[in-house]
Image: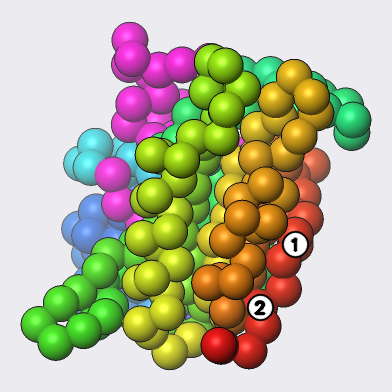
Amino acid sequence: MDKHSEVIKNYLDNKDKYFCDDCLSKLLSIEPRQTINAVCNKLFRQDMINRCKGECSRCKKVKIVNGIGHMYNNEVVNHEVNSQNHCPNLQNTNNNGVFSRLPFDEFENRVGLYLNKKFKDSFYEKPLIVGVNKVHKFDLVSLDNSIVAECKSYIWTKNDNFPSAKISTAIEAVFYLSRIIAERKVIVFQDDFNKKGESLVETFIRRYDGILDDVEVWRYLVGESIEYDRIEIKREGKECW
C-alpha cells in the first residue's frame, strides 16, 4: 500500500464518520484534491473503504463521501433523513413477501451504493450531452460513462389506477437515454403492487416495451440492509428500432 493510501485508510479506520474529498484533503494536508479522489477510488475498488453519495461529517454538504462501516448510519444518509420531513420505510406486500419501500432520495442513494459494489466503480449524478446545446443530468453514471442509470419510484393511484401522469417522467428518461451512447442504459424502479397484485414495473414494460429499445428495466428490492438487497432484471436491452 502506498503512503497516501495508508494515511487515508488509517484515518478512516479511526473515525466512525464519512468525509468528502475536499475535507479529507484539508484534514490530511494531501494536495491537490485530485490525489484524494484517485486514491479513494482505488481503495474503493479494492473493497477497503466505502464511497457513495451522502453528507460529509465535516462540511455537512451532500457530496461523494468516503468512510468505513455501515453507509446508512448517522450523517451518511441523505441530508433529509434526520429531518422532520423524513418518512419512515413503507411496507409493501406482494407474492414474494414483504420488502421495504424507501423515500425517493434515500432510494437513489441506495441504488448508487449497490451499483458501486456491483460494478466496482463510482457512480455519480452527471450531466451528459443529449442534443445541440442541450444536456441532461442523469442520476447515476459510471466514471467512464459506459453505464448510465435513471432511478424512478412510483405508486398506483388511490383507486389502483396506473399513474400515467407521473410515469411521463420515466418516458422522458427513456428519451434522454436514447440520445446518448453507453454500453448499458438502465431504468431502476422501486416497484409497487395494487390490490390485484399487479406490478407497476411489469405494467410499465407491457405498455411501453415498443419504445424502450436498448434500455434495461430493473426492479430493485430493498432488504433489511444493502447486503440483502437484490435486483430483478425485468427487461433486457434490445436492438434499437
Name the residue located 68 percent from the left edge and 56 percent from the top edge: 206
Three-letter amino acid code of the residue under disc 2: Gly
Q: How far apart, in angstroms, are the residues tagged by discs 2 and 1?
A: 10 Å
- Which residue bears the numbered disc 2? 237
Left or right, 54 with respect to 230, comes to left
Depth check: 138 or 205 in front?
205
Rate crowding at label 1 as few (under 14), some (14 to 19) or many (20 or more) other CA atoms within 10 Å: some
Identify the element where label 1 is drawn: strand
What secondary structure is the magenta-colored segment mainly? Answer: loop
Q: Residue furthest left?
A: 133
- Which residue bears the numbered disc 1? 233
Image location of residue 72, percent across then percent down: 54, 35
Residue 203 in view, yes or no: yes
Residue 10 in view, yes or no: no
Q: Quadrant of residue 199?
A: top right
Against 113, is 193 above or below?
above
Q: Quadrant of the N terminus?
A: bottom right
Left or right, 212 with respect to 171, comes to right
Identify the element where label 2 is drawn: loop
Against 102, is 26 above or below?
below
Rate crowding at label 2 as few (under 14), some (14 to 19) or many (20 or more) other CA atoms within 10 Å: some
**Does residue 150 belong to the magenta stretch?**
no
Q: Which residues are magenta?
A: 62-88
Image location of residue 62, percent across then percent down: 28, 44
Mark 2 in CB contact with mark 1 (< 8 angstroms): no
Q: Quadrant of residue 133?
A: bottom left
Name the residue located 24 percent from the left edge and 54 percent from the top edge: 23
Depth check: 49 or 184 in front?
184
